Amino acid sequence: MASTCEVRSLQWVMAIFLLALVGRARAVSICNIDSAQLNECRPAVTGNSPKPPTKKCCDVVHQANLPCLCNYKSAFPAFGINPALAMALPKKCGMNTPRECHVV
């Protein structure tokens, strides 16, 4: 079972993402990226026929602290993001996939 700290951290991150997606909050920095930059990768991580990541998306992926970001993969479905597609982005962008990003 997750510790209270982990649960609160996940709730905080989900609130940040939700506010950013709704557009009521200014972009916030999480895992070395601006939350508004996450939209660059949205077409590559949503839907039944996702598009390949764009150069802008890969720029965001290269900038991100991937182990940090991947620790939140369980929250991705709440925002319409397919975790398997999101965890495949590092490889598609020419990077090694961190251990935390592997989908089991």
Image (tube, rainbow, N blue to C red):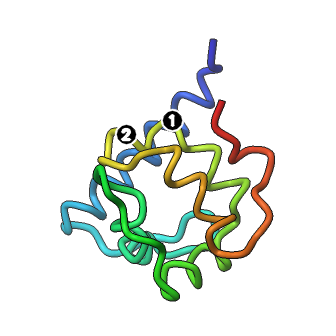
Q: Which mark is residue 63?
A: none
Image quarter for residue 90?
bottom right
Q: Does dot 2 land on a helix, a strand or a loop? A: helix
Whole-Å distance between the Cαs marked 1 and 2? 7 Å
Q: Amino acid at mark 1?
A: Ser
Q: Which mark is residue 77?
A: 2
In the figure, 86 relative to 24: above or below? above
Query: Residue 1 appears at what percent x and percent y?
Result: 63, 11
In the figure, 18 relative to 53: above or below? above
In the figure, 82 relative to 40: above or below? above
Q: Are marks 1 and 2 in contact (CB under 8 Å)?
A: yes
Q: Residues within 10 Å of mark 2 (few under 14, many from 20)?
A: few
Would residue 1 appear left or right of 35 to someone viewing this image? Answer: right
Query: Residue 32 appears at what percent x and percent y?
Result: 63, 72
In the figure, 100 relative to 90: above or below? above
Q: Which mark is residue 74?
A: 1
Between 90 and 10, the one nearer to me in the picture: 90
